Image: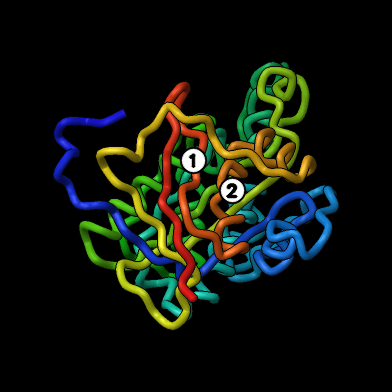
Amino acid sequence: MTLPSALHAPPLTVFVEGIGLLGPGLGNWAQGRGALEGTETYQAARCIVPLPMALPAAERRRAGTVVKVALAVGQEAVMASSLQASALPSVFTSSSGDGLNCHEICSALASSDRLISPTRFHNSVHNAASGYWSISSGAMASSSVLCAFDGSFAAGLLEAMAQVMLEQIAVLLVAYDTDYPEPLRSVRPVPDTFGVGLVLAPRRSERSLAQWRLAPATCLTGAPAQRLEDDALERLRSSIPAARCLPLLRSVAAQSQGEVVLDYLQGLQLAVQVAPCL
């Protein structure tokens, strides 16, 4: 699809400065990189979410799974970039937020005692992870929080790349999803927790891992989204919305050049031009 107003617009170009990863069988980016480039065998396993030790004890006790996974991947990405977390604007994106917290609130409302815990309530808002990130990192920069159902990763990537281009400053992108217990799982079958953190910068540095580019005239496409050759990784990509990032991460791991098409909206995908920074 070509938009007339985009014919002469400059491309959105960013450099990947740091990556954080956490998901089923993926404890960090180093482990994920090996599985994605094929040097290690991917073994699916339940996601192990670490405690958010950067939070004060009181906030740590109240943090839900989405907060824990978002902080874990955000911190890993920022540490890899060697930038200051407190100075980075951020974009947080999730298709569904905290599935367990939603389940507990619905269970309370369906019971005879309909009182809702204040902790449950404040963890139910879509910007909960962003707020906890600000507490843990001391970040005072702007933070955008998005949701686009199964296209939430692509929506967040578009927002983050646009901010990098317009403001000429590095931006942290964090995408995450968690699973729902039954009976919600039967209508929203997200099987496990997954998160990815990306520090994107406007200029190349000695730490840059890859260059990503969106051409405004052609980045929205009807071409099918790229699939992964490994069956287990493909099941992960297709079953958790935040894991739609995996073909893009594979291009970084394999240091490949070309085009990666990501799931976005129904019948409309996002085409990213990728190149390694060797």
Determine the image quadrant of residue 238.
top right
Q: Residue at x 75, y 59 (%)?
A: 38
Q: Is residue 131 something one can see in this rendering?
A: no
- Amino acid type, label 2: Pro
Distance Cα–Cα, label 1 vs label 2: 8 Å
Give the labeled residue for mark 2: 247
Q: Looking at the image, is mark 1 or mark 2 earlier in the sequence?
A: 2
Q: Is residue 208 something one can see in this rendering?
A: yes
Q: Residue at x 40, y 45 (%)?
A: 145
Secondary structure of the residue carrying numbered label 1: strand
Left/right of residue 42 with respect to residue 223 in the rendered view: right
Determine the image quadrant of residue 33.
bottom right
Colour basis = rainbow
Relative to 67, residue 94 above or below: above
Label 1 crowd bin: few (<14), some (14–19), many (20+), radius 10 Å: many
- Amino acid type, label 1: Val
Q: Quadrant of the N terminus?
A: top left
Q: Nearer the viewer, residue 154 or 218?
A: 218
Relative to 206, residue 262 above or below: above
Relative to 201, residue 228 above or below: above
Label 2 crowd bin: few (<14), some (14–19), many (20+), radius 10 Å: many
Relative to 107, residue 29 above or below: below
Q: Residue 178: horizontal and vertical position, in percent? A: 66, 40
Left/right of residue 47 with respect to residue 172 in the rendered view: right
Q: Residue 12: horizontal and vertical position, in percent? A: 29, 53
Q: Residue 19: horizontal and vertical position, in percent? A: 55, 65
Q: Residue at x 61, y 63 (%)?
A: 253
Q: Residue 244: horizontal and vertical position, in percent? A: 58, 41
Give the labeled residue for mark 1: 261
Q: Disc 1 vs disc 2: Cβ atoms closer than 8 Å?
A: yes
Left/right of residue 76 with respect to residue 44 in the rendered view: left
